[in-house]
Amino acid sequence: MGFILKNTSGLINSKLTDTARQMLSQGKFNITYFQVGDSEMLYNYLDPTYPISNTMILESGFNAQNSSGNPESNKQNVKYPYYVDGNNGNTYGIPYMDSVISPIYNTAAMRGFFSGNTDSLPTSWSAVTSNDIAKYSNYVVNMSSLTGGTVISVDNISCNPVQYTLPNVGDFVTIYYDNLGNNNCSCENLPTPTPTSSQYSTPTPTPSVTATKNAPCGTPTPTPSVTSSCCPEPTPTPLKTECFMSMSSCYPIITYRIIDVCNNKITLDRPTPDFSNITFATCYARLIVYPKTMTDLYDSITPLNHYNDDIINFESVCSQDEFDVKIWNMNIPWSENLAGLDSALYKDYQQFGSVNYLGTKEYLGYMSNSGQTFYIDNTFSAETTDTYYYNSLGEIIKVQPEEQKAIGIIHYTNQTIDLFYGEKFALQPYDESAPYDTTGQARNFKLHLPWLMWHKNPECCLGETFWVDPPGFDEDPEIVLFKERYIQSTKNEDMNSPGIRYYHLWDTNVNPDGYPNRVGKVFPDDRIIVIDDEELLAAMSYKSNRNWTLPASKLFLSTPNTCNSLGSSVGILTGSNETLYVTYRFTNTSAFTNSLHCNYYSKITGPNDCNPSNSENVGVRFGGDLHCLDFYSNTFKQGFFAEKIEIICQKVTTGSRPLSDDWRLIDMTDSLSANTVNGYITKDVLTGTTFVITKELYDDATINNIYDLGDYIQLTGENDNTTQLNFGDEYYFYGSLETDIQATIYEMVYKLNLSNTEFQTSSNPTWNTTTKPYITELGLYDSNKNLMIVSKLQSPVLRQGIQQFLIKFDF
């Protein structure tokens, strides 16, 4: 303990005593009394002209009262308290408490794999290839050499010349099939390179470097010798090398797991697209390699030492943990098998990665129907679901918790002990009256997926940003997007005032009803984001083999032989006790690639009349949400491509879920109403066609064509124990997140009121009634008169008239 510095310290220096902290731990903390005193005043030994403000005052002590027992016990109450009345007797006053709640806001740095100026719309995005994000980014592959195999031959065209850690088995690699891999990189703050023929050739580092996750971004220099000072005089630090790869979402961007590395040949967990019949201008796709686990690059295995090696040297900041984990985590737990996955042949959802997050899926209301209701407002106060999407004709499709096949949980889980995201996401309403100070507003929350071809966005090349409070919807009072909602327990009513708070996550693409599309929920108090749009989840799943989403079809009942008399008069659905589940897939047989079917399952129930003469077939229609579907040609184009459309369907008893190994596959390509282009389906061809699922087609598929997803995606075999990538194996969120953050300060404010007739007489033996009294300290006590808070004044304060002191203590 030292003395209070008069030029830098606060006017009142307060500390919670050791006894007070002990009482807090026992639930006995209370403030009942106060004293004021002048224990550090010496009145009668100094000339009356001496400036009292110069008097030095000891700092408040943590151990002003310690009740832990000998030899630690100590008690430094106010030594010379003022008398409340007269010159003897009671010295304790009664304080008044006024609790104050003070929210504070700040802006967190954008963290993730992508960089761009998000204040400028549309945003031009780059993939970050710096050493703290990408493990290796200097490989490219000649796209014309890709014929749909799993082994690729790579060349070295540098994107980050100070990157030395080569790929390993088990690493993830994202391949940007954009034909721009030879000239789409740039770096800032590069060290001075050794002259070479290439702008981004890898320099020879001096001295030699062992490639580790903590390798410096610039050319390393010898470590300076240790001095006797903990914090030696700083030397100029070279600016960190930042490297970027320009990109857009126009093209296939697919993530694989590396199965083998042999010289310049890399074996992937599944086939690449087949581009062998395409004429390219420059031919290259760039590979960006990411580590197989968090702790290989982004995080530490255990928390770093927060204090110095001498344990509790509180003044040392040399080894303080300020480890900044640059990325967010993502886990996608599945609670049922995907359509076409036969658990007798392939590993099922119970063996997927992220299965250990299924408990969170239940907790957040995505598993059982009976565990919760969703409080939206007084009109809709007991909804069984608050999850829905729009099909391709703009109709709302609700998804019950028991129908939710998977969710994506985006979270920030790591070993850093620094609270980069405060206590919660700051989600305050937009205030148009303060356009220049928006800190804390929900509109600053943005989830960026720059690689995504989102089927609701007419532009394929811009990626997609999702918002809690999207701009552009403020003018219509009927459309309220930013609104707090609550999950309420059906088992514990005490939780339901109000419940678990969340907000919807929206895009900005308008549906016919004027609303944008919701894709998930943001839980600000848990600092997590849940993606529940199952098509968006498909694109976010590395194993799905696509970075585009597909729209949900519209189903309707169709009377048999309405358009022709070639089929049976008996429809596929004979009554309301039968339900048909329908999805579809785009398939290629001669070029490009195959991927996961549409992960939306549409369903329709049969007619109410069970008479077979009134049975119905099922019609399937598509709207205009296929903006990125393009036709293939011998020149490279943007978007994705399809030679065939195949309907995947299953009839079940109404109220039942479909079985993953009992879906029928029906090739509907011959039903297209117009010719394809170069053998490929276009959006106009698809939207102009009505597909009809008849009993005959369904029965034929039952015999000849049960859907096997393994025919299109290389699934992990039941007995396969290799490093094969599987669904749910994602660990990082491949995007970027912006948000403001919030913490709440709860202040205990104690008012110490001194009237003009009380606390006039000091018990200090050096004071007399002819001398002006001063105050140097304040003490707050519990009901047993234990000292809880001790406050010292920077300089003695004259006791005069009516005075009030405010003692604040916050949590």
Image (spheres, rainbow, N blue to C red):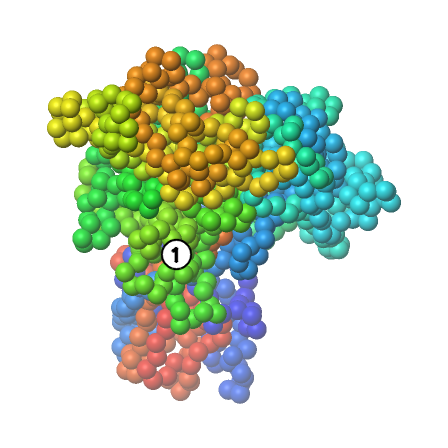
Up the image or down, 710 lies above or below 802; here it is: above
Q: Quadrant of the C terminus?
A: bottom left
Instruction: Name the side, left or right, on which 630 lies relative to 343.
Output: right
Of 59 and 181, which appears nearest the observer? 181
Q: Residue at 54% of width from left, 66% of height from top?
A: 3
Q: Residue at 43% of width from left, 71% of height from top?
A: 434
Up the image or down, 135 lies above or below 711; here it is: below
Pick out the residue farthest to the front. Answer: 565
Of 396 and 558, which appears nearest the observer? 558
Indicate the position of residue 259 as horizontal and vertical percent values: 61, 22
Instruction: Name the side, left or right, on which 189 lies relative to 477.
Output: right
Indicate the position of residue 261 as horizontal and vertical percent values: 68, 23
Of 363 and 179, which appears nearest the observer? 179
Indicate the position of residue 569 as horizontal and vertical percent values: 21, 23
Instruction: Name the side, left or right, on which 608 lies relative to 300.
Output: left
Indicate the position of residue 221 as horizontal and vertical percent values: 79, 44
Up the image or down, 569 lies above or below 156; here it is: above
Neighbourhood count class around disc 1 (C-alpha, 10 Å): few under 14, some 14–19, many 20 upward: many
Using the rendered view, name the quadrant where residue 31 is placed: bottom left
Whether residue 372 is visible: yes
Q: Residue at 49% of width from left, 22% of height from top?
A: 712
Of 149 and 449, which appears nearest the observer? 149
Q: Which residue is mark 1?
A: 469
Q: Label 1 sits on what residue type?
A: Asp
Q: Residue at 20% of width from left, 50% of height from top?
A: 380
Mark 1 lies on a secondary structure that is loop
